[in-house]
Image: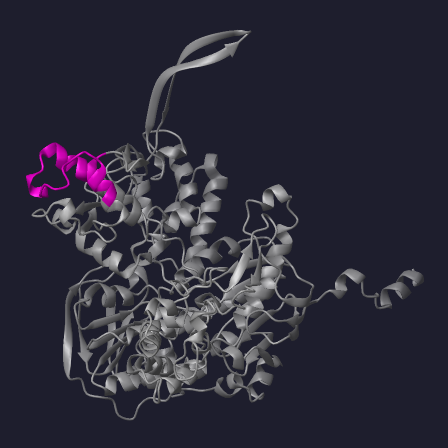
């Protein structure tokens, strides 16, 4: 007894397995990180902060999370690895103490027409099983309720080897799917305006086709002229019915043109495959303009936009079909499922209930399962991805979040904070890249990167607690308690933009006057109808410049100079100064280094191992032929100009021999949005989310318009960058423009001249105007959630 007592009072020695309580990073050099070393505590909430472009994502995503995923992939056989994305080891000397990383990023969900909130979260899969078991009348298996499975049947003879003899037998099969046969499960049908496809007064050889890429001299022109199904010299209006059908609708047919075997296909199926199968926002601008001009999209008349066949819609549980269930607001659907008492499917009901409750808990109860996943904002998509992790029993994993508060009202941020803390309290390591002070304030540990962005960043400025950050004197520390004050005097409107009877999505017959000539902020909780009101009701006519949240895409070959159109005046200036063709000064055209084709690096594919990229020995990474670099403008060759920062280039093209007003104007806009430090030839793939957002804003500022509509321009911006953005918005308004901003950031609300607040809740609880007036009136009234949070923010 005494021995036992003595043993209990001794403090147990630390077990070797308990000594790994830190994630150690030593010598990280990914992107702009400057050989940094840090230690991150496990089973704690660590927030990584710093100005946009300081290296936060490079540290958290491209180093820690990437190495964790690479090491997990290496545990599979080489056969399996051959089917997985190959990941290179990040540039870092030592990475110790890593755990399995689960990444929840801001990447928008696939915008495929067949992807919905239900299919993306497996809620639809569970509903389909539920209806296949309980639905009356019974119409088949779960496939019979899927809008992605077509009903097919077939019969024929099959040859079977049996007991050494070959026997022919007749077999038949049929699959009952839930796809609507008219719209093929897309929910909408497209009609073509034929006058936008061709000019019927001309023949094909005279250039009748007006579709982008279908010119007479091009590849498609040769196919249509040489196919032999119609006379290419006859005007289209004189075609027979048969010839017109072959031109527009002919099924894929093998043909020979100039002794080359090809497949001919009618214009409409070819356009459907090449243009309509893609997300319209992902198309090139001139192709998108053609699609919007030539096609009309309307709800399928057969299924009413539900995507489902008549059979799938006829099977019901308590009078509700699967189409009705998917169209319900998720919070209502959760209540309906809770009311189903059926012991035979109890485990299924429990799993479905948990998934639907997670939607409500995370603040997405206003969505419906039939909502197309491509229409979700970045913040909504990120929270949808979180749903599968909320009820998980996994512990000791690392959850990595990229600005989880994007698109969230201050009221919703409190709820998000609770979810992050709950993940941590289950024994997980939570790493968050974040800018909002409300989210930084709950951190156990903070890593502040900086001091600047790009080449001026990439070092650790501070590690420690929130109190330590406040006193640290870093850029984040100095701005942490910044609060934008309400304006003493607001601008007076010069006119109004009237919206009457707006009903798109959840808007409830809204009438509102948007003031012009001022900074107007539209706010409200997530899902209250802000984007529906502005994007759905403000006419996108000439004079309205709309900057949405869709992130810009770009490959290694695209950079700020190509994206903004800056390279065109630069190429022309070089060509004029040297008396040669402008195409020589493009690394994607005639001037490209022949060895690396203008990429600057040579890639070696190593199958399941990470590919190797080596700098091209011929051009030393400059991307251009040696002969092109002999041409100079203002004493610099084209590769030296592309290596300049925006600030240097603005000075270079501002005066002297290299003076180029067109280039100088574009560079001025890039400097206005705070991108003066960016290299104009830096690949877009290396830019952070905030930098891409501002690059997009700078490009749209060039468009001629009187009304600018900005959708959450503070996404990805540090507190210090938000100040610069407010200055830019002020300059736009002072120059006579009208600026309408959809925003949650209180600094932007406080700075507004006029606020329109939607609510009071989300989904069918929202869609109404709950306040219109000045920020001071909103704070004084405190009649809405926004008013309460803004009052707390400005300290009144």
Q: Is residue 724 above or below residue 392?
A: below
Horizontal arrangement in the rendering, residue 439 relative to residue 253 (left or right): right
Q: Would residue 531 be counted in the magenta stretch?
A: no
Q: Nearer the viewer, residue 430 or 729?
A: 729
Q: How is the image coloured?
A: one colour
**The magenta stretch spans residue 229:** yes
* Left or right for 593, reference 311: right
Q: Which residues are magenta?
A: 222-250
- Residue 472: x percent and y percent? 58, 87
Seen from the viewer's position, the closer of residues 19 and 714 is 714
Q: Where is residue 93 drawn, in percent x and y?
A: 68, 68
Can the viewer see residue 690 in this picture? no
Q: Quadrant of residue 153?
A: top left
Residue 188 or 679: which is nearer the viewer?
679
Dividing the image into 4 quarters, which one contains the C terminus? bottom left
Query: Taking 510 as reference, is 219 left or right?
Result: right
């Amino acid at each position: 007894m005494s021995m036992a007592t003595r043993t209990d009072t001794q403090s147990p020695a630390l077990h070797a397995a308990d000594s790994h309580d830190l994630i150690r990073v030593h010598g990280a050099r990914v992107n702009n990180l400057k050989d940094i070393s840090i230690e991150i505590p496990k089973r704690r909430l660590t927030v990584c902060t710093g100005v946009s472009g300081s290296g936060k994502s490079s540290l958290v995503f491209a180093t820690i999370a990437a190495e964790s995923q690479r090491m997990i992939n290496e545990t599979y056989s080489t056969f399996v690895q051959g089917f997985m994305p190959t990941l290179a080891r990040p540039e870092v000397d030592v990475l110790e103490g890593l755990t399995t990383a689960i990444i929840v990023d801001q990447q928008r969900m696939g915008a495929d027409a067949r992807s919905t909130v239900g299919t993306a979260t497996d809620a639809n899969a569970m509903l389909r099983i539920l209806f296949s078991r309980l639905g009356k009348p019974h119409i088949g298996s779960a496939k019979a309720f899927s809008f992605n499975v077509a009903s097919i049947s077939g019969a024929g003879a099959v040859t079977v080897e049996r007991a050494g003899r070959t026997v022919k037998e007749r077999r038949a099969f049929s699959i009952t799917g839930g796809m609507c046969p008219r719209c093929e499960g897309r929910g909408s049908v497209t009609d073509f305006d034929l006058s936008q496809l061709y000019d019927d007064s001309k023949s094909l050889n005279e250039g009748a086709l007006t579709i982008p890429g279908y010119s007479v001299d091009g590849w498609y022109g040769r196919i249509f002229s040489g196919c032999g199904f119609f006379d290419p010299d006859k005007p289209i209006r004189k075609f027979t019915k048969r010839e017109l059908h072959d031109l527009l609708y002919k099924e894929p047919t093998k043909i020979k043109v100039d002794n080359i075997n090809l497949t001919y296909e009618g214009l409409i199926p070819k356009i459907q495959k090449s243009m309509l199968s893609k997300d319209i926002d992902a198309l090139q601008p001139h192709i998108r303009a053609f699609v919007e001009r030539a096609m009309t999209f309307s709800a399928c008349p057969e299924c009413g936009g539900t995507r489902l066949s008549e059979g799938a819609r006829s099977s019901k549980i308590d009078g509700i079909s699967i189409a009705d269930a998917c169209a319900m607001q998720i919070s209502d659907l959760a209540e309906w499922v809770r009311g189903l008492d059926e012991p035979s499917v109890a485990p299924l009901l429990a799993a479905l209930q948990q998934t639907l409750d997670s939607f409500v808990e995370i603040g997405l109860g206003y969505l419906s399962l039939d909502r197309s996943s491509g229409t979700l904002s970045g913040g909504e998509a990120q929270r949808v991805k979180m749903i599968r992790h909320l009820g998980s029993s996994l512990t000791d994993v690392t959850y990595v979040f990229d600005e989880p508060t994007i698109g969230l009202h201050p009221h919703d941020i409190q709820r998000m904070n609770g979810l992050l803390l709950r993940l941590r309290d289950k024994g997980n390591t939570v790493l968050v890249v974040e800018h909002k002070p409300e989210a930084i304030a709950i951190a156990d540990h903070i890593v502040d990167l900086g001091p600047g962005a790009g080449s001026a960043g990439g070092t650790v400025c501070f590690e420690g607690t929130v109190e330590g950050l406040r006193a640290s004197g870093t850029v984040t520390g100095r701005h942490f308690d910044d609060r934008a004050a309400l304006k003493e005097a607001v601008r007076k409107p010069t006119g109004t933009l009237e919206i009457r009877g707006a009903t798109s999505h959840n808007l409830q017959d809204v009438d509102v006057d948007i003031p012009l000539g001022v900074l107007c902020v539209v706010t409200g909780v997530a899902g209250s109808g802000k984007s529906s009101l502005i994007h759905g009701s403000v006419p996108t006519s000439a004079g309205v410049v709309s900057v949405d949240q869709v992130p810009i895409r770009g490959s290694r070959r695209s950079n700020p100079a190509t994206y903004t159109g800056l390279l065109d005046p630069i190429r022309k200036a070089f060509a004029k100064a040297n008396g040669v063709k402008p195409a020589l000064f493009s690394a994607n055209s005639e001037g490209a280094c022949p060895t690396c084709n203008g990429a600057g690096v040579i890639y070696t594919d190593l199958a399941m191992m990470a590919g190797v990229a080596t700098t091209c020995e011929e051009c030393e990474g400059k991307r251009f032929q040696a002969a092109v670099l002999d041409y100079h403008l203002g004493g610099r060759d084209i590769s030296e100009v592309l290596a300049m920062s925006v600030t240097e280039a603005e000075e270079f093209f501002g005066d002297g021999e290299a003076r180029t007003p067109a280039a100088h104007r574009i560079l001025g806009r890039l400097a206005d949005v705070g991108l003066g430090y960016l290299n104009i030839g830096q690949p877009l793939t290396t830019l952070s989310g905030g930098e891409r957002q501002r690059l997009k804003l700078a490009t749209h500022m060039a468009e001629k318009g009187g009304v600018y509509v900005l959708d959450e321009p503070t996404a990805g911006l540090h507190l210090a960058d938000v100040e610069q953005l407010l200055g830019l918005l002020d300059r736009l308004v002072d120059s006579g423009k009208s600026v309408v901003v959809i925003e949650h950031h209180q600094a932007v609300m406080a700075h507004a001249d006029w606020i329109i607040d939607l609510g009071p809740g989300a989904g069918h609880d929202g869609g109404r105007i709950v306040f219109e007036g000045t920020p001071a009136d909103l704070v004084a009234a405190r009649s809405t959630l926004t008013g309460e949070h803004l009052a707390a923010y400005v300290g009144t």
